[in-house]
Image (cartoon, coloured by chain):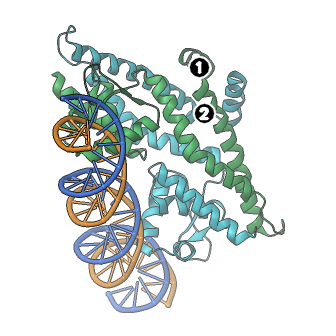
Chain colours: A cyan, B green, C blue, D orange
DNA sequence: TTGAACTTTCAAAACTTATTGAAAATTATT
DNA sequence: AATAATTTTCAATAAGTTTTGAAAGTTCAA
C-alpha cells in the first residue's frame, strides 16, 4: 500500500472509531491527520486535507485543544496559527480518559450516591430491588473509578508492566 | 426522595450515560428499567413505563439480548414474552466490554496491522512519521486489548482485589 | 488609524440516527 | 382451518447532530 492510501485509511478508521465511542467524527479525523503529520499544520491545510469548512475545522481543533491532545504552535515568520497533536499515544489516551471521566462519569456517580438514599419500606419488593441495584452499581462504579484513576495518573511502563504481570 | 422519582432519575441518568458512550438512549433506558424491576416485564409494560412505541421497544430489547445482558423468560400461564436484565452488574459490564471490543476495537486493530506495511522510503519524513504513529498506536492497542481481555474473562473478586492491590 | 490577514461565531441547511405505527408474519388457541 | 394474540418489520417521519459559509471579531504591521 502506498502512503496516501494508507493515510486516508487511517484517518477514516480513526474517525469511525471515534464516532462509535461518541466522539465527533471530524474531531477524530483531525486528530488522526495531526497524529501522522510530520510538521505542524495550519487551519487551511486541515480544511484542504479533510475537505471541510473553516468553521468546522476551527470548532473541532478548539475542542481537541480543550481535551489537551492538540496544541497551537507558532511558526516563526508566519502569522497563521499551526497545530500539532500529542504524538505519544499513551499520553493522549490518558488525557482522553481523564477528560471523559470528568465530563461524563463523575456526574453520574454523584447521582448514584443520591439515589442510594431513596425512602421506603424495605419489605416492598420494588424498593428492595431498587436499593440492591443501586448498591451493586455503586460498588462496581467505585472500583472502576479507582482503576481509571490509576490509569490516568500512571506512567506507561510502570502501569502496564505491573498490570500485565498480574493478569497473565 | 420517593421511589418513583428515584426510578425516573436513574433511568434518565443511565440513558444519558449510554448516549454519551455511543449507545442508543432508549436501549440504555430499557436496560435501566429492567435492572430495577423486581419481576420480569412484558413489552407492553416497557412501552408504558418509558412511553415508547411497540417497534422501538421490540428493536431495543432484541439488541439488549444480542449484547447478552437481557433475556427472555416465559411466565407460566402467560402467552406474552417477558424480559429480565442480568442483575449482576459485573457480569453486565464484562458482557458489554466483550461485545464492544468484538464489534469495534477488533476491526480497527486489523486495519492497523495492515497500515504498518505501508511502502515507502524511510528517509521521507512523511513515511517516517506515519510508521512511527502506527507502531505506537499498535503497541498501545495491543496492551489495552490484553488488559480488556483480562477484564472480560475475570471473576470480579479476583480481578479487582488483585488490581487494587497493585495500583494503590 | 487603517486595512489586510486571520480567527471565531452562529443561524440555516445538510445529514444522520431514532422512532413511530400500521401491515405482515408468526405463534398459539379453539 | 379459522381466528385471535402477539411479535416483527420497515417505510415514512421526527428528532438530533454536524457542517457550512458568510458576517463579525480580532490582531498586527505599516
Residue visible at 19% across and 41% down in the picture: B51
> Which mark, residue B159?
1
State the image coordinates of residue B84 (x, y, percent, origin top left). Answer: 34, 26
Marks counted in the figure total 2
Residue A71 visible in the current orientation: no
Judge whether D20 appears above or below B52 on screen.
Answer: below
Q: Chain of mark 2?
A: B
State the image coordinates of residue B41 (x, y, percent, origin top left). Answer: 27, 28
Q: Which residue is mark 2?
A: B148
Residue visible at 61% across and 25% down in the picture: B153
Judge whether A73 appears above or below B42 on screen.
Answer: below
State the image coordinates of residue B132 (x, y, percent, origin top left). Answer: 74, 56
Residue visible at 65% across and 54% down in the picture: A87
Few, some or many residues within 10 Å of mark 1 (<14, 14–19, 20+): some
Judge whether C2 appears above or below B142 on screen.
Answer: below
State the image coordinates of residue B134 (x, y, percent, origin top left). Answer: 71, 55
Amino acid at each position: 500500500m502506498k502512503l496516501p492510501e494508507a493515510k486516508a485509511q487511517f484517518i477514516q478508521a480513526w474517525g469511525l472509531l471515534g464516532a462509535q465511542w461518541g466522539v465527533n467524527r471530524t474531531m477524530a479525523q483531525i486528530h488522526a491527520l495531526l497524529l501522522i503529520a510530520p510538521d505542524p499544520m495550519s487551519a487551511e491545510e486541515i480544511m484542504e486535507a479533510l475537505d471541510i469548512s473553516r468553521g468546522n475545522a476551527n470548532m473541532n481543533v478548539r475542542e481537541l485543544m480543550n481535551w489537551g491532545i492538540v496544541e497551537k504552535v507558532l511558526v516563526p515568520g508566519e502569522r497563521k496559527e499551526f497545530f500539532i497533536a500529542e504524538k505519544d499515544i499513551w499520553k493522549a489516551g490518558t488525557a482522553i480518559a481523564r477528560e471523559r471521566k470528568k465530563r461524563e462519569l463523575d456526574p453520574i456517580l454523584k447521582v448514584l450516591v443520591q439515589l442510594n438514599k431513596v425512602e421506603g419500606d424495605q419489605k416492598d419488593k420494588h424498593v428492595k430491588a431498587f436499593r440492591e441495584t443501586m448498591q451493586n452499581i455503586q460498588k462496581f462504579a467505585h472500583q472502576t473509578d479507582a482503576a481509571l484513576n490509576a490509569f490516568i495518573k500512571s506512567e506507561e511502563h510502570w502501569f502496564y508492566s505491573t498490570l500485565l504481570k498480574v493478569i497473565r
